[in-house]
């Protein structure tokens, strides 16, 4: 059984994920020629990118 993550580790993971969502929002807004908004970017990123992003971080030991 693995040890629970510290609050600092969870917060760092949250910040890293939020940064990726904001990056995705910027890229998709540029493609759309308008601000798509955080909620749309969040839903799209979770549906299409989150699992791969998490696997890549785990592979790097983050």
Image (cartoon, rainbow, N blue to C red):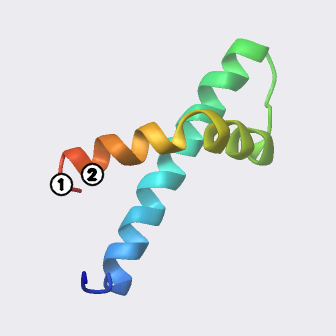
In this rendering, is residue 54 above or below 6?
Answer: above
Identify which residue is drawn at 25% across, 86% down. 3
Question: In the rendered image, which quarter contains the N terminus?
Answer: bottom left
What residue is shown with label 1? Answer: 61
Asked which secondary structure carries label 2, the reply is helix
Q: Secondary structure at mark 1?
A: loop
> What is the tally of numbered marks visible in this picture?
2
Most distant residue in the left direction: 61
- Quadrant where the C terminus sits is bottom left
Q: Residues within 10 Å of mark 2 (few under 14, many from 20)?
A: few
Q: Residue at x 32, y 75 (%)?
A: 9
Residue at (61, 33) in percent of width and height: 48
> In the rendered image of this protein, does residue 28 appear above or below residue 43?
above
Is residue 4 shown above or below 18?
below
In the rendered structure, find residue 43 and report the number of the disc placed on it. Answer: none
Give the labeled residue for mark 2: 58
Percent coordinates x, y for residue 8 in the rendering: 33, 80
Instruction: Give neighbour class at mark 1: few <14, some 14-19, many 20+ (Cα, 10 Å).
Output: few
Residue at position x 63%, y 44% in the image: 46
For the residue pair 13 and 25, the one nearer the viewer reads as 13
Q: Position of residue 15 (x, y in %)?
A: 45, 61
Tell me where residue 2 appears, x and y as whole percent: 24, 81
Q: What percent of the width, then of the height, locates residue 7? A: 38, 85
- Marks 1 and 2: in contact by CB < 8 Å? yes
- Residue 9 versus residue 26 in the image, above or below: below
Name the image quarter holding residue 13. bottom left
Q: Marks 2 and 1, Cα distance to the nearest angstrom?
A: 5 Å
Residue 32 as seen in the image, left or right of residue 54: right
């Amino acid at each position: 059984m693995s040890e629970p993550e510290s609050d600092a580790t969870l917060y760092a993971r949250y910040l890293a994920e939020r940064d990726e969502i904001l990056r995705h929002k910027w890229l998709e807004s540029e493609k759309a020629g308008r601000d798509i908004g955080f909620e749309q970017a969040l839903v799209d990123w979770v549906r299409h990118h989150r699992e791969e992003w998490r696997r890549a971080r785990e592979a790097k030991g983050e």
